[in-house]
Image (cartoon, grey):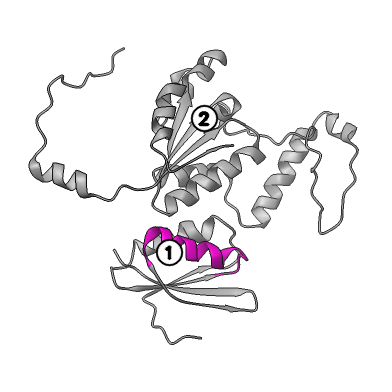
Amino acid sequence: MPDIQADEVLDCSGLLCPMPVVKTSAAIKKIEVGQILEMIATDPGAPPDMEAWARQTGHELIDQTAENGTFRFWFRRTK
Amino acid sequence: MTAEREPAIKPAPSAEDLIAQATAPKPKRLALVASKGGLDEVYPVLMMASTAAALGWEVGVFCTFYGLDMVNVKRNKKLKVAAVGNPASPPPINGVEARVPSIVGMLPGMNAVATKMMKGWMEKSNMPSFEEMLDMCLESGVQFFACATTMGVMNVTQEDIMPQVSCLGATAFLDYAAEADLALFI
């Protein structure tokens, strides 16, 4: 597990597309620019989806892990 | 028409506003045509629309023919899944292929059964209901347009349409879609 201190954690376990992306978009708006959001998902489409979400929105995907079907993402709000 | 007209001469925008307008990054735009009104047919529209909105895109959905039911308050509480006409239905249940003869789908009440089944799968997968998806889209700024011709052909009045939805013809929608980065017909 990477050593990243998240300011906010969003658990999207058990949710399918489009919910993880929709909830992440709402959650990132609630933290300050520069702060970090950790998101947990089990949707198998989450890794490519969250990478694409970061590319499209411009928020930084700092790191991600995959362990036993659980995916974790750390995003930094950039704007 | 009782709608208020915009004044013919508008006050000139300030230089700051003009500069801000010209330099603001233009969001991507998705234009969707929703032409079907089955519960299983409106989900993909709302999924695409809500996802695009979550990416910060501008989204416009042109609801035409049966797709108008989605925003018709008299009909959008009772969207159904058709029990006949879909050779892929029913999908395997717990990995087991269910072989249901097509003729069974013609029995009275089978649309209700198919609808209930689909709602059950959605709930089991923690998917929002149609109503929740629609609200999610509206809250995230997705615009819905009601096809004016469909309203005329199907006798749908302005009062039947959700108040957030504006009525347009194909010309106005194509004008909107021409500025889109991506347009899909569902």
Helix, strand or loop under label 1: helix
Q: Nearer the viewer, residue B2 or B145?
A: B145
Tally of numbered tags: 2
x, y percent for residue B65: 58, 24
Does residue B175 lie above or below B20 as drawn?
A: above
Q: Chain of mark 1?
A: A
Taking the image as shown, residue B113 lies to the left or right of residue B65, namely right
Residue under the point 39% across and 28% down:
B175
Seen at 36% across and 76% down, the residue is A7
Q: Residue B80 falls in which quadrant of the image?
A: top right
Hey, what amino acid is under mark 1? Ala
Write down the region rendered in magenta: A41-59
Residue A54: give its label.
1
Instruction: Give the residue drawn at x 14%, y 41%.
Output: B18
Q: Residue at x 65, y 57 (%)?
A: B125
- For disc 1, the neighbor class at 10 Å (few under 14, some 14 to 19, many from 20) is some
In the picture, the quarter occupied by the C terminus of chain B is: top right
- Residue B63 - label: 2
Check whether the beta carbons of the residues at disc 1 and disc 2 lie within 8 A of each other.
Answer: no
The spot of residue B45 in percent (x, y) is 56, 41
Q: Position of residue B169 (x, y in %)?
A: 44, 21
Q: Secondary structure at mark 2?
A: strand
Q: CA distance from mark 1 to mark 2?
A: 30 Å
Residue B132 shows up from this direction:
no
- B93 is higher (above) or lower (below) than A60: above
